[in-house]
Amino acid sequence: MHKEKILVIGASGQIGVELTLALRKMYGAAQVVAADLREQNPLLAGTGPYVSLDVMNKEMLHVQVIRQNITQIYLLAAILSATGEKNPSLAWNLNMQGLLNVLDIAREEKLSKVFWPSSIAVFGPSSPRINCPQQTIIEPTTIYGISKYAGEFWCHYYWQRYGVDVRSIRYPGLISYKSEPGGGTTDYAVEIYHEALAKQSYNCFLKEDTYLPMMYMPDAIRATTELMEAAAERIAIRNSYNLSAMSFSPAEIAASIKRQLSAFSISYRPDYRQAIADSWPQSIDDSVARRDWGWKPQYDLDAMTEDMLLNLG
Ligand code: NAD
Ligand code: AKB
């Protein structure tokens, strides 16, 4: 039996909803407290405890952690790449201060584990574009990528200096049907399925040959829980693990949809998000995650398309 009591901060977001539901299955509904700036979430209603909370308010966060006997925190609250470019100082403040508040409380309250996601956005134009390795040149050019890379160093620092068991994954772009994506550059790969079913057509904000690393949400949730359940001595990387499942372009995801919905068509009108996408690698080498804690993805593009269309249809 697990004795852990988990706080998921940012539980109403694209990942948060599905992660909260998965953790509730694993640990029991009462053991997983969902927390978000948003007052409620219909997808989580009736599935377990929910509190409205601002991760920037350290005192209130600390009170919740003590009051609810929290032993683990999953911190998902952040501003993503596209929204971040519209308001860089807001993105920096939330992404950094939110993490520092959680790491400090984890140290003070001797929490057993912390999960904090990084992103493939840490990589920049000087990183290898194909099979980008775990350790390489990392010079991000978006404020989101800068905040994630700085956050990785803070995670490593709190582990090395204070022994906080913080674990992290550099998620690729995530595709899901339950909860809307929250302002990223890879969001097109979610929108395209919605519009394929609603209108049989999609106008894409990236160019047709823009390859990016991507992953279907069930793989991302499984990766997260497998990393968090792994024995501490297997976690050699304390900044953040590269993680990979597939890499495709808008033209390829469109072709995959067309194989199932023959009337579907795509057009292209690239906007400011093209420059963000062009600064990231096209594919990721995740051999270190595979070696250390046995990571292996299950979904490829066509399997994901079939499942997305089935669940959205
Ligand atoms: P999202 O934008 O969908 O959700 C973030 C949630 O945080 C929202 O529900 C929002 O209301 C909440 N939030 C915002 N400010 C808050 C605050 N001050 N206090 C409490 N809650 C607050 O994001 P997501 O896609 O679920 O991403 C979660 C994490 O995973 C982020 O750190 C993101 O950088 C990372 N990530 C996501 C992806 C992806 O493709 N979704 C890829 C790589 C990394
Ligand atoms: C984004 O596009 O900002 C996110 C990410 C890859 O971190 N999906």
Image (cartoon, grey):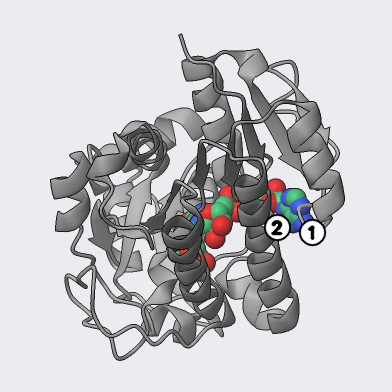
Foreground mark, 1 or 2? 2
Mark 2, secondary structure of its residue: helix
According to the picture, the residue beneath numbered tag 1 turns out to be: 56
Task: Please state which of residues 55 and 210 is positioned toward the viewer in this rendering.
Answer: 55
Estimate the x, y position of residue 16 in percent, counting from the top left: 59, 40
Name which quarter of the figure residue 294 lies in.
top left
Residue occupying image coordinates x 70% and y 57%: 101
Residue occupying image coordinates x 73% and y 82%: 89
Q: Is residue 157 visible?
A: yes
- Count of residue discs: 2
Estimate the x, y position of residue 171 in percent, counting from the top left: 40, 56
Residue occupying image coordinates x 69% and y 32%: 34
- Examine the rendered structure and indicate whether residue 271 appears above or below residue 304: below
Labels 1 & 2 near each other (Cβ < 8 A): yes
Structural crowding at the residue carrying mark 2, measured as other residues with C-alpha within 10 Å and reported as few (<14), some (14–19) or many (≥20): some
Mark 1, secondary structure of its residue: loop
Reading the chain from its start, which is encountered first: label 1 or label 2? 1
Quarter holding the N terminus is: top left
Task: Please state which of residues 70 and 17 is positioned toward the viewer in this rendering.
Answer: 70
Name which quarter of the figure residue 267 lies in.
bottom left
Q: Is residue 182 visible?
A: no
Residue occupying image coordinates x 38% and y 63%: 239
Asked if the beta carbon under badge 1 is closer than 8 A to the nearest atom of ligand 1, the reply is yes
On residue 259, the disc is none
According to the picture, the residue beneath numbered tag 2 turns out to be: 101
